Image (cartoon, rainbow, N blue to C red):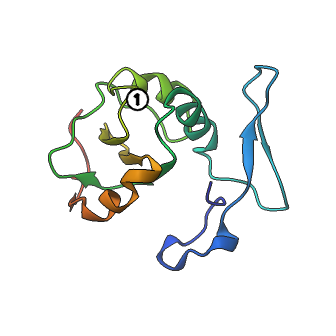
């Protein structure tokens, strides 16, 4: 998962933080090294666990052309966002695009669909958004 507050325009391998969910069920994120992972790490780790065919997650603060949208706006990094996302997607899919209402978007892909991530069309998100 990318490290917290990294400029993603020039992201490199060194800007990622190895992490995993604590296995005893308390939801903590365990990470390696000095850099903290993105505030979205708890959400993304839950998604990786619940979506067995997904190997990559790209999160942005724009929208995607023709993607469905979550029904509720949930703040960035709130773990409840994982449940909202999972209620909107096919858990057996290997490629998913989704708007996060009032937040941005997710593109999720399995290893065999990685190239499809490069073909997604983006849209400017209206600010302020009407909820």
Q: Nearer the viewer, residue 19 or 95?
A: 95
In the picture as drawn, the residue positioned furthest to the left comes out as 66
Q: What element carries label 1?
A: helix
Residue at position x 62%, y 47% from top? 39
Relative to 17, 105 lies left or right? left
Where is residue 116, by image quadrant? bottom left
Relative to 4, 47 lies left or right? left
Q: Nearer the viewer, residue 95 or 20?
A: 95
Q: In this view, does 20 lie above or below 33?
A: above
In the picture as drawn, the residue positioned furthest to the front comes out as 112
Where is residue 23, by image quadrant? top right
Q: In this view, does 74 lie above or below 40?
A: above
In the picture as drawn, the residue positioned furthest to the bottom comes out as 10
Mark 1 sits on what residue? 85
Residue at position x 49%, y 50% from top? 56
Locate the N terminus by quadrant: bottom right
Count of numbered circles on the image: 1
Where is residue 78, by image quadrant? top right
Q: Position of residue 85 (x, y in %)?
A: 40, 29
Locate the C terminus by quadrant: top left
Relative to 12, 36 lies left or right? right
């Amino acid at each position: 998962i990318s490290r917290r507050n990294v400029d993603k325009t020039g992201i490199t391998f060194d800007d990622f933080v190895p992490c995993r969910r604590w296995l005893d069920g308390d939801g903590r994120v365990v990470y390696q090294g000095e850099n903290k992972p993105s505030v979205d790490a708890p959400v993304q780790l839950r998604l990786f666990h619940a979506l067995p065919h997904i190997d990559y997650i790209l999160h942005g603060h724009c929208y995607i052309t023709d993607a469905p949208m979550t029904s509720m706006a949930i703040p960035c990094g709130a773990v409840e966002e994982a449940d909202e996302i999972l209620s909107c997607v096919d858990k057996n899919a290997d490629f998913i695009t989704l708007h996060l209402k009032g937040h941005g978007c997710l593109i999720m892909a399995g290893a065999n669909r990685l190239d499809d991530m490069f073909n997604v069309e983006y849209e400017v998100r209206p600010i302020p958004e009407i909820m």
